[in-house]
Every structure is written in C-alpha cells, then in structure tokens.
Amino acid sequence: MSVTKLSNITVDGVDVFYRAAGNPSLPTLLLLHGFPSSSHQYRNLIPILSKSYHVVAPDFPGFGFTTVPEDRHYQYTFANLAQTTAAFIDALRISKFTVYIFDYGAPVALRLALDRPDAITGIITQNGNAYAEGLGGFWDQIKVYWASNSTEDRENLRKTLLTLAATKWQYENGNPAFENVPPETYHLDYALMERPGNKDIQLDLFKNYETNLPLYPKFQEYFRTSNVPILAVWGSADQIFIPAGATAFKKDSKTAEVHLLDAPHFALEGREQVFADLILEFLKRHGI
C-alpha cells in the first residue's frame, strides 16, 4: 500500500491542496469531491486504488485546505472551478485520466470533458449528476433563489442548508449504517464552512449551479459521441441527486453500468471496499 502524500501547488493564482498516491507512471484516477466536503472524503479509497493506479484528489477553491489569496478576487463559479482544475492537472502534467465525479465534481469534470474530450478515459459517477431528472427535492428552495436572486431567499438558504444539522443529514439520511460514520467527517465539513466568508462562497455556488443546467444536453451529447466508459454507483436514498440521475446515463451510453446502493448522498463513506471492487473491475474490463 502506497503512502498518500499531502501537497500544495500554486496554479491559476490559487494554492491548491491535494492528496496523491501511487506510481505516476501508472494510469491516473482524478477524484473530484462535492459540497460541502473535500478530498478528505477519499482518504480511505485512495490507498486501495493506488495499488494499481496513480490517484490524485484536489480540493476545489472554497473547500478543504485550498486557499485563495484575497487579492486574487476569485469569482466562485463552476466555470472558474473547472478552469482552476484544468490548470491543476496541467501543472501535474496529467494529459489523460479517468475521473471520479461526486456532486459538484460532476459539472466541473464534465466542463473539462467538453474542452478536452480525448483526455478522459473513463467516468466513475457517484451521485454526480448530468440530467434534469436527477435533481431531487433538495434543490427546490435553491430553485426559488435562482428565480428571485433575492437577499431574503439567499439568507433562507444560509439558515437551512449551511448548518451542522444539514451537513450531518447528507451522511445520515437513508443510511442504514450511520453508526459507522466517523463524526469527524461532517464536523470537519462544517468547521471549514464556518471560516469567515465561506458560507457566502457556498451561497454563490448554489446560485451559480443553475449555469450547469443548460450544459446538461451538451454533457449528454458528449456521452453519446465519445463512447466514454461510464460506471454509476449511486446512493439510492440520496435526495440531492436522486437515482433517476443514475439510470439516465443509460439513455446516452450503451455500455453504462449502474449500481444503486442502499446508501445516502455520501455513499462512499464506510463503503470504500465496495466501491473499490466495482471501480477496479470496471477499469480492468475497459482496459484502463
């Protein structure tokens, strides 16, 4: 088992924190996290996968331990998260990779795919959505904010979705084994959100997520035209990105493989070996 190295690299004017393990000469797996977590969510998966692959997991700006200088005047949009991620993989000289997409990691990676369709050798999507039918009830109040762009609706989201209880809920809701989830997971997520100004970053990204929806048809066209191998492993109890988003991949990918697990939004937590077995078998089957 290789040791996971913790590093920082400055790209796009941002000090990006990332975890990496495995021999860089091996095929690369890029693990992209979601809201409100960081590369920390992959801490137990990385050592398993890095026996056979070079594994890299960065923290997006606004998340985890990546830091953005104040004078960078960074605009927290999905277009910019994708730009920073592109600069990150370029700095590490990663030209081809299989990408693991979860939550916010999906639109970031799929924006990259539109720009670099030949770079991605495979997609592993864990509650990483690309279909309108995959948006669950969690988004209802965010859609109200999309429509109004009002301070009142923005502050309502702060009170309801950016709390410790709401963070814990993403790990707990529909989880038959919640007692096995280390409490430091959701406490770390929330502690990092409590940093000055971070909740406004999260609210900006809630608002900006609507810019991803017009790209969904382009993402779907990419699936059809690229024939990129797709493995969807989904927490079936997720109310953020619901199972319809997983099965929808089959509409645009003839070979998409879908597994619905009895698990919540953060389906990976506590199920790393289950995921690793599915991922390694998928990669082997596709010669990656």
Image (cartoon, grey):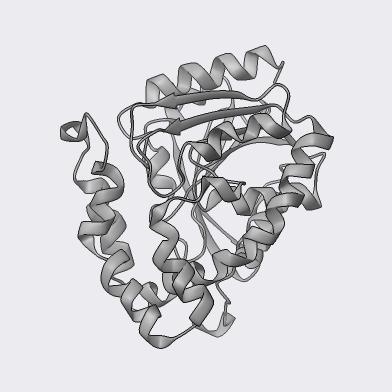
**Image x and y of residue 23, in percent:** 60, 27
Direction from residue 7 to residue 168 in the image, left or right: left
Residue at x 45%, y 86% (from the top left corner): 150
Front residue of this view, candidates 200 and 58:
200
Query: In the rendered image, is residue 95 in sight?
Result: no
Determine whether 269 is above or below 74 in the image: above
Q: Compared to 271, does 226 lie above or below?
A: below
Image point 27% across, 37% down: which residue?
174
Q: Looking at the image, which residue is at 15% across and 33% down?
A: 179
Q: In x, y percent, where is residue 18?
A: 50, 49
Q: Quadrant of the N terminus?
A: top left
Looking at the image, the residue that sits furthest to the left is 179
Examine the rendering and report whether any part of residue 138 can be seen. yes
Quadrant containing the C terminus is top right
Nearer to the camera, 129 or 89: 129
Could you say which quadrant of the image residue 64 lies in?
Answer: bottom left
Q: Residue 15: percent from the left, percent from the top? A: 53, 64
Report whether 55 appears left or right of 191: right
Q: How many marks?
A: 0
Q: Is 268 in front, or is 191? A: 268
Q: Where in the figure is residue 207, as x and y percent of width and height?
A: 51, 72
Q: Please tell me whether residue 110 is drawn above or below residue 155 in the rendered image.
A: above
Q: Residue at x 20, y 39 (%)?
A: 182
Q: Is residue 157 above or below residue 170?
A: below
